[in-house]
Image (cartoon, helix red, strand yellow):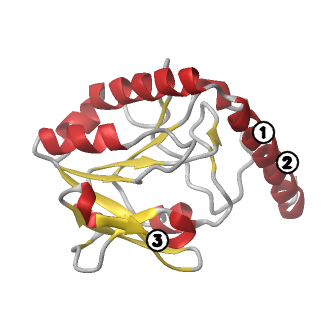
Amino acid sequence: MNASNIIKEKNAQRKIIKEKTDSLTEAYCKNSDEGIYENIISLNDFQRATFIFCFASVEKEINTYSIIRHAWRKGKRVAVPKCIGRGIMEIYEIHSFDDLEPGAYNIPEPKKGCKLIAPSQIDFSIIPCLSCDREGRRLGHGGGYYDRYLEDTDFVTAAICRDMLLLDKVQAEPHDRNVDYVITENHIIGTRVSL
């Protein structure tokens, strides 16, 4: 499949997943959030990590605030992303949710004064997606923020995805970076590292 066809196919997949997301019930999302939280915190790679990189969720996304709270309770450090330009982000450490404010696209971002964190300091990351497949290919919004950021990193990556939004196969472009884990409410799928 050539590059333009891959992009068309990914856009078609995004449309399908967004429609499915809109049809999910509040009860399903709540149960799914809880199952994903339990599966993330049970991971050896998460438990061993001293520094976590995690996005701050919005609206219909999987709730990450309980995961961040758990990390703090366990004495882990936490960094969240900040959009600094088109397709470019950096990550900054936060010590409480008071360190967040609405940023680009109204996504919670670290306030001015938070400490910039180098990728080499991170042990484990929780990556958003619209959907994933079982091989760790991730369907994002199309901005390329995470693919660019993850390009030269070696920390463990886990995409969180609701079971009902998994795809059989996500079309991938050459720059797309597979994640090490796909975590749903019912499955922990290790795609590269041993569990």
SS at badge 1: helix
What kind of residue is marked 2? Answer: Ala
- The residue identified by callout 3 is 103
- Answer left or right for 49 relative to 181: left
- The residue identified by callout 2 is 12
**Residue 169 in sight from this viewpoint:** no
Image vertical order of residue 173 relative to residue 143, above or below: above
- Residues at marks 1 and 3, CA–CA distance in whole angstroms: 25 Å
Q: Residue at x 79, y 51 (%)?
A: 10
Q: Quadrant of residue 193?
A: top left
Q: Quadrant of residue 167?
A: top right
- Residues at marks 2 and 3, CA–CA distance in whole angstroms: 28 Å
x and y, in percent, of residue 11 in the image: 81, 53
Contact? badges 2 and 3 (CB < 8 Å):
no
In the displayed image of the protein, which residue is found farthest to the top?
Answer: 186
* Circle on res. 19: 1
Contact? badges 1 and 2 (CB < 8 Å):
no
**Residue 136 in sight from this viewpoint:** yes
Q: Please tell me how crowded label 1 is: few (under 14), some (14-19), or many (20+) other residues with Cα within 10 Å.
A: few
**Dot placed on the residue nearer the N-terminal end, 2 or 3:** 2
- Answer left or right for 188 relative to 154: right
SS at badge 2: helix
SS at badge 3: loop
What kind of residue is marked 3? Answer: Gly
- Answer left or right for 157 relative to 25: left
Q: Please tell me how crowded label 3 is: few (under 14), some (14-19), or many (20+) other residues with Cα within 10 Å.
A: some
